[in-house]
Image (cartoon, helix red, strand yellow):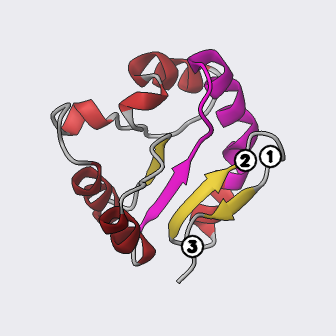
């Protein structure tokens, strides 16, 4: 879980809402200034889902993520309490992606509640 989502506060509330997810915060493994691609690659090797708000706008990041072997889910920009609510509601979709063995970068649209692949090969 990226720090931009609310860090420990979000992790604790998500788990106390009854979700038995093994959540690792970015800052528990890497320094605050670590490049997103470094920790995302670590997450892929560990078979973890990356949850973030980062949009990965640079061409380098997009090129790397087109071939990303793991799963990145980009959540909409909203306050931390709303992020918790949104994450709880969308968790079944995230789990579905993971259990289907899908990889790549997916983005949730808060208005439609739909999930779409961020970049197509």
Q: Nearer the viewer, mark 2 or mark 3?
A: 2
Height in image: 22 above or below 47?
above
Say which residue appears at 27% left-offset and 56% top-offset.
Answer: 37
Whether residue 19 sits left or right of residue 51 in the image: it is right
- Residue under label 2, please give it: 109
Which residue position holds label 3? 102
Q: Are marks 3 and 1 in contact (CB under 8 Å)?
A: no
Direction from residue 94 to residue 53 in the image, left or right: left
Q: Are marks 2 and 3 in contact (CB under 8 Å)?
A: no
* 2 or 3: tag closer to the N-terminus: 3
Tell me, yes or no, whether the highlighted magenta stretch contains residue 18: no
Classify mark 1: helix, strand or loop. Answer: loop
Q: Residues within 10 Å of mark 3 (few under 14, many from 20)?
A: few
Toward the bottom, the furthest residue is 121
Is label 2 in contact with label 1 (beta carbons under 8 Å)? yes
Is the residue 69 above or below the residue 25 in the image?
below
In whole angstroms, how far apart are the C-alphas of marks 3 and 1? 19 Å
Q: CA distance from mark 2 to mark 3?
A: 19 Å
């Amino acid at each position: 879980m990226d720090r931009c989502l609310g860090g420990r506060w979000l992790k604790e509330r998500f788990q106390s809402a009854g979700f038995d997810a093994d959540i690792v915060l970015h800052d528990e493994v890497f320094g605050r200034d670590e490049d997103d691609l470094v920790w995302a690659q670590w997450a892929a090797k560990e078979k973890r889902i990356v949850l973030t708000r980062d949009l990965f706008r640079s061409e380098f990041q997009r090129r790397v993520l087109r071939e990303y072997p793991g799963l990145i889910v980009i959540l909409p920009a909203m306050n931390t309490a709303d992020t918790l609510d949104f994450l709880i509601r969308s968790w079944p979709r995230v789990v579905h992606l993971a259990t289907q063995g899908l990889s790549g970068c997916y983005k949730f649209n808060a208005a439609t509640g739909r999930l779409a692949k961020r970049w197509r090969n």
